[in-house]
Amino acid sequence: MPQSHDALDGLLDLLDLERIERDIFRGESRSALVPRVFGGQVAAQALVAAGRTVPEDRPAHSLHAYFLRPGDPGAPIVYTVDRIRDGRSFTTRRVVAVQHGQPIFHLSASFQAYEEGLDHQADMPAAPDPESLPTPAEMLPRHLPREVADRLIEARAAVDLRYAEVPPWGSVGEPREPRSQVWFRTNGKLADDPLLHVVLATYVSDMTLLDSVLLAHGRGGWAVGDVVGASLDHAMWFHRPFRADEWLLYDQESPTASGGRGLGQARIYTQDGRLAISVIQEGVVRVPR
């Protein structure tokens, strides 16, 4: 099993795209827990591609994305960037990810030059101290078969992700309030590049957001195989600067599920209480027949 720093280096290499033309990039893939590319990887790589065509003084402030087809972990992904707009304050990019001649994902991202403005936010909810919570290596084997736990630990080895309460696969058959909290940070320090921190938060944001849908129905999810699921679309708004190598609270809830789909929405706070990111995602959540 990879050491955490080695895993983070591997993830950073995965996100360091090869530029093959002015606005065309190529990224490698790797397997996830299911036989397709992890959605957070594709979203993060697409944001890297967009960000590399934007001036450094314009950080990302939002992204909106659709997952169109499952990604093949055995093939590279080509990202083509369309320079939609370069305004005085805002820059807009559209990115299409292609494999085997077909689009598998597309993303629109907006970047803004810093400016002063009105400022308010929702208060940070109560949450346990992240250092008081069990690490993934301590917690996962308590609730999953050893082989499944090891695969999940390996897949997430670049990130220290700690559940504030028992995760869905630890309470199968026990419907609960559709809310969940996790603390996360990268397992190692990152460079000061603001785009890198936004990209890493994007990568992690796809890991647990639909957990709250599962909690409402006492389902364990993909780790135990009692639902079939996949991300459909994903939106993020980046409100304030943050570091992905410092603790971030991911406060998640599901307001609804219907029609074979579940909706998750969340806020991500820094440990000192600043609202850094808002996230909404809809996914396929089907009970196997």
Image (cartoon, grey):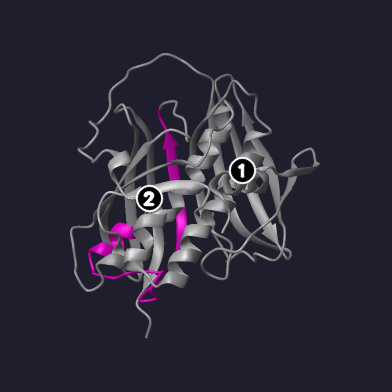
Is the C terminus in the top left, top right, bottom left or bottom right quadrant? bottom left
Residue 88 place in picture, x, y as percent: 58, 19
**SS of the residue at dot 1?**
strand
Pick the front one: 174 or 95: 174
Mark 1 crowd level (few <14, some 14–19, many ≥20, 10 Å Cα): many
Q: Is residue 234 above or below residue 171?
A: above
Left or right, 252 with reference to 53: left
Residue 276 place in picture, x, y as percent: 38, 32
Three-letter amino acid code at the position of disc 1: Arg
Q: Quarter of the image holding residue 236?
A: top left
Q: Can you tell which mark lies on residue 94? A: 1
Boundaries of the magenta span: 210-239
Q: Is residue 175 above or below residue 65?
A: below
Cβ atoms at labels 1 and 2 below 8 Å apart: no
**Residue ID for mark 2:** 135
Number of numbered discs visible in the structure rendering: 2
